[in-house]
Image (cartoon, helix red, strand yellow):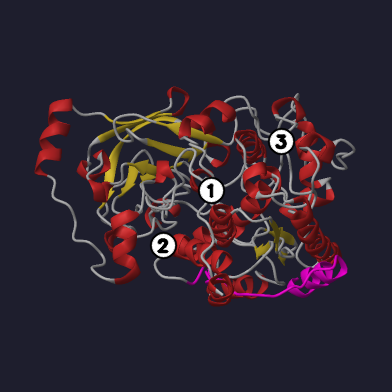
Amino acid sequence: MAQAVRRGVLQAGGLPLEFPATALGENLMKPTAMLYRNLMAMDVEESIRAYPMDAVVLLGGCDKTVPAQLMGAIRVDIPTIMVTGGPAEPACFRGRKLGSATDLWHYTDDFRAGRMSEADYSELEGALYPSAGHCTEMGTASTMTIVVEALGMALTGSAAIPAVDARRLAAAEATGRRAVELVREDLKPSRILTREAFNNAITVLMAIGGSTNAVIHLIAIAGRAGINLTLEDFHRIGAHTPVLANVRPSGEHLTGDLYRAGGVPALMKELSGLLPGDALTVGGARVAANFATAQVADRDVIATLAAPVNPAGAIAILGGNLAPAGAVIKRSAATESLLRHRGQAVVFEDIYDLGRRIDDPDLDVDADSVLVLKNAGPKGGPGMPEWGMLPIPQKLLRRGVSDMIRISDARMSGTGFGTAVLHISPESACGGPLAIVQNGDPIVLAVERRRIDLDIPEQDISARQKRWTPPRPHYRRGYGAVFLEHVLQANEGCDFDFLRRLPDEAPESEPLGFLNGWIGGW
């Protein structure tokens, strides 16, 4: 794809030069790639600022690389355009097309419950990733690539093209050509990333049944652009935006099917009554013009506003005494009967405690219990790993239990599902109310009322908070120490406090290089 971008730049009369950015291997980095998103954003920002570039093409594709690149480029504010890697070819196992991870979660539960043999599981493992590309379902990678197009920072129709489709290379080449034109037009991110653009992105996020991780990333991206995006913005827009994309884990199909059904332009045309159509895009046209001629080719994949896949919306924003600064739940991938529930807490102090006890036959848990994980947030994880989809205890899996309420200050993979309350803020490692929950405490989830509550007397909560002591910091030196000192909470995007743009703050000027300074002095 980089070679295709280079060809496009050359065709338009520019000089293409590749440069690398920090590599974030989403499923390999310990404890999570999210710990390093801000580091990659700093790397991208300083590289663009320091070198004499007229424009930049951001080439990424997975959960943290896409927001990191945008966060870095926004602060420099030179002409910028993004092209992403595209979803992989879907695996096929026993005659069924698989989502990269959504179906893996299901099969893993079958394996843990004894309903699937080790030999069958090994066969599944061998079949799971047949090609290059990111997640095939509406995980965080697919979500973020689509959100970038909705923001106006990628060419129209490019986000959902499969990774192995020749049209993805054509889109990359067109992106290279457009990058040179952006310089001539002096079209910068600051003109594109407006409040209206973020409204469009949130609307599309809700309509695709997108990942809860996008809430954090969009808040962080907006913060770099000087826009104060809050959880209430997601509630305001999400409250009247139904799910239209019938894509796993909120539906049945895969991201490649969405592309074949008309892609993001067709979806946005269905949403036209909910979108600010005059927002400018990196292609030079307004949003409404970009989807004016789009058509839906498959109504089983892209539904109408009148007959949506899920009228209730994808992501709900919660408050309550357990989440005074907010929490999220992906209601489109949750169990409807659990969205109003009262149960007793089964508490795990951290991921190691969970690992030791979750499958203990003597664990005091039943299907009505509420699984609680602490110390998994931005500081407690550290980095806020995707641990929020806590595993169902093995003894309950064997009884046929497939979902129960899980709450934490962690994130959840966009490929995940189930009734998981995530991003609880403030996190437990900072002394948030989650820190003082004890085994047996009654917890009440009421999604329609937008609340998650610890149902004990207020004086007991206050007394416990007074006795609480903070955990020992994970890092005392290096980047880890910088992260712990400066990372914001989930409701503020988990960016570093010193990297958010202040209102009306101009971009920093580029420093003079050796040659610039020498010529100027001479």
Q: Find the magenta span and give its range.
A: 1-28
Give the label on residue 221, or none. 1
Disc 1 crowd rating (10 Å Cα; few below 14, some 14-19, many 20+) is many
- Residue designated by label 3: 279
Q: Please, what is the three-letter code of the amino acid marked with disc 2?
A: Leu
Q: CA distance from mark 3 to mark 1?
A: 17 Å
Report the front residue among 482 and 452.
Answer: 482
481 relative position to 213: left or right: left
Image quadrant where residue 225 sits = top right
* Residue 405 in view in this figure: no
Task: Give the residue drawn at x 79%, y 48%.
Answer: 283
Q: Where is the C terminus found, in terms of image quarters?
A: bottom right
Give the label on residue 4, or none. none
* Residue 163 in view in this figure: yes
Q: Please, what is the three-letter code of the amino acid marked with disc 1?
A: Ile
First in residue order: circle 2 vs circle 3: 2
Task: Give the residue drawn at x 56%, y 42%.
Answer: 333
Give the label on residue 35, or none. 2
446 relative position to 434: left or right: right
Q: Is residue 21 magenta?
A: yes
Badge 1 marks a residue whose secondary structure is helix
Q: Please, what is the three-letter code of the amino acid marked with disc 3?
A: Ala
